[in-house]
Image: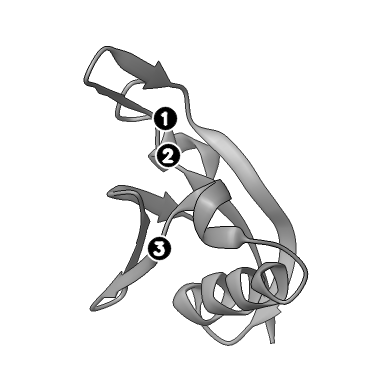
């Protein structure tokens, strides 16, 4: 198994903005999408993850929260809006 960090890209919309942020460190899984699902489901077991991060969407081999793409590294996450 590999270890994946999970980063959310930055955004700027409707008068609000946020820089890229680290959501999780060293989540073990075979693929990045599996790591995201594992992190999200573990968080959902102990909190209201949807109100904190939004509904997780998986489209092909990409994962999104509130329309923001998730990445396994800070450089890709910072390409949009820092």
Residue 1 image-quadrant placement: bottom right
Pointer 3 residue: 55
At x 30% / y 75%, what residue is drawn?
61
- Nearer mark to the viewer, of 3 and 1: 3
Secondary structure of residue under mark 3: loop
At x 64% / y 83%, what residue is drawn?
29
> Which of marks 1 and 3 precedes in the sequence?
3
Judge the density around disc 2: few (<14), some (14-19), many (≥20) Cα neighbours within 10 Å.
Answer: many
Pointer 1 residue: 78
Residue 72 visible, this orientation: no
- Residue 64, how many percent across, how many down? 35, 58
| Left or right of 14 on screen, residue 37 | right
Q: Which quadrant would the C terminus be assigned to in this image? A: top left
Pointer 2 residue: 77
Q: Is residue 58 above or below residue 77?
A: below
What separation in Å lies between label 3 and label 1 (alpha carbons)?
21 Å
Residue nearer the viewer, 63 or 40: 40
At x 23% / y 78%, what residue is drawn?
60
Residue nearer the viewer, 2 or 65: 65
- Residue 28, how many percent across, how many down? 71, 78
| Left or right of 25 on screen, residue 74 | left
CB within 8 Å, label 2 to label 1? yes
Judge the density around disc 1: few (<14), some (14-19), many (≥20) Cα neighbours within 10 Å.
Answer: some
At x 53% / y 77%, what residue is drawn?
37
| Left or right of 18 on screen, residue 2 | right
Residue 9 image-quadrant placement: top left
What separation in Å lies between label 2 and label 3 (alpha carbons)?
19 Å
Q: Is residue 71 above or below residue 38?
A: above
Q: Is residue 63 above or below residue 11?
A: below
- Residue 40, how many percent across, how many down? 59, 69
């Amino acid at each position: 198994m590999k270890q994946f960090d999970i980063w959310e890209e930055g955004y700027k919309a409707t008068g609000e903005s946020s820089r890229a942020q680290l959501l999780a460190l060293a989540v073990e899984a075979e693929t990045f999408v599996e790591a995201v699902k594992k992190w999200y489901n573990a968080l959902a077991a102990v909190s209201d993850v949807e109100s904190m991060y939004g509904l997780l969407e998986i489209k092909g081999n990409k994962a999104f929260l509130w329309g923001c793409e998730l990445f396994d590294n800070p450089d890709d996450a910072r390409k949009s809006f820092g």
